[in-house]
Image (cartoon, rainbow, N blue to C red):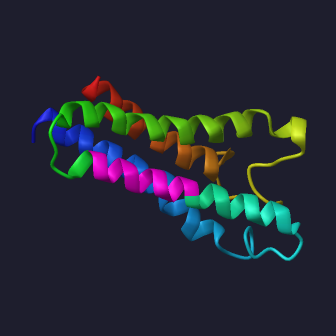
């Protein structure tokens, strides 16, 4: 396997984590269908999930559809993942300032005391970083 194919696979895995897994998990009673959530908060959640999903589709198109200037497309494909990852980590770091949390009480999956969300997005960041490093 050549380096470009490896980078495309790594970025595809990151895009799946950022654009497919969150809607599967969050279109549930824990988030979108949570009766305790304000309707406007639900709108923002659906907006976020849809945006992440559409950005992932955009990345897949840039990575896998044949086109002229394909190397430039690969570089462009690196950007949306970093946008989504940065948004998550900013929200996580500043969660205390706005009353947020990494998960609902009693619902967080932890591994060695680390939130499952942090682990999941950190793994996505590793794939994203590796793919970006190869391409740039």
- Tell me what residue is drawn at x 49 percent, y 35 percent: 82
Secondary structure character of the magenta stretch overall: helix
- Tell me what residue is drawn at x 64 percent, y 55 percent: 48
- Tell me what residue is drawn at x 10 percent, y 37 percent: 2
Q: Position of residue 86 (x, y in %)?
A: 59, 34
Which residue in the rendered view is the most extreme toward the front?
A: 68
Quarter of the image where the N terminus is located: top left
Residue 131 to residue 18: above or below = above
Q: Position of residue 77 (x, y in %)?
A: 35, 39
Relative placement, left or right, of 93 versus 97 is left
Residue 112 to residue 41: above or below = above
- Tell me what residue is drawn at x 36 percent, y 48 percent: 59
Quarter of the image where the C terminus is located: top left
Is residue 107 something one can see in this rendering?
Answer: no
Relative placement, left or right, of 76 versus 23 is left
118 and 131: which one is in front? 131
Which residue in the rendered view is the most extreme toward the left?
A: 1
Q: Is 53 included in the stretch rendered in magenta?
A: yes
Residue 30 to residue 83: above or below = below
Q: Is 116 included in the stretch rendered in magenta?
A: no
Q: Position of residue 92 (x, y in %)?
A: 72, 39
Relative placement, left or right, of 84 versus 33 is left
Q: Quadrant of residue 16?
A: bottom left
50 and 23: which one is in front? 50
Relative placement, left or right, of 127 versus 26 is left
How many numbered discs, if any? 0
- Find the magenta span and give its range: 51-62
Q: Quadrant of residue 74?
A: top left
Is residue 63 something one can see in this rendering?
Answer: yes
43 and 8: which one is in front? 43
Q: Quadrant of residue 44?
A: bottom right
Q: Position of residue 123 (x, y in %)?
A: 47, 43
């Amino acid at each position: 396997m050549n380096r470009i194919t490896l980078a495309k696979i790594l970025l595809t895995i990151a895009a799946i984590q950022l654009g497919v897994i969150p809607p599967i998990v969050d279109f549930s009673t824990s988030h979108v269908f949570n009766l305790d959530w304000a309707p406007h908060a639900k709108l923002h959640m659906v907006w976020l999930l849809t945006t992440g999903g559409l950005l992932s589709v955009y990345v897949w198109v840039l990575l896998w559809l044949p086109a002229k200037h394909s190397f430039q497309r690969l570089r462009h494909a690196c950007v949306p993942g970093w946008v989504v990852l940065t948004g998550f980590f900013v929200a996580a770091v500043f969660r205390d300032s706005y009353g947020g949390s990494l998960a609902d009480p009693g619902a967080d999956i932890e591994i060695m005391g680390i939130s499952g969300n942090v682990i999941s997005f950190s793994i996505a960041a590793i794939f994203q970083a590796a793919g970006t490093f190869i391409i740039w």
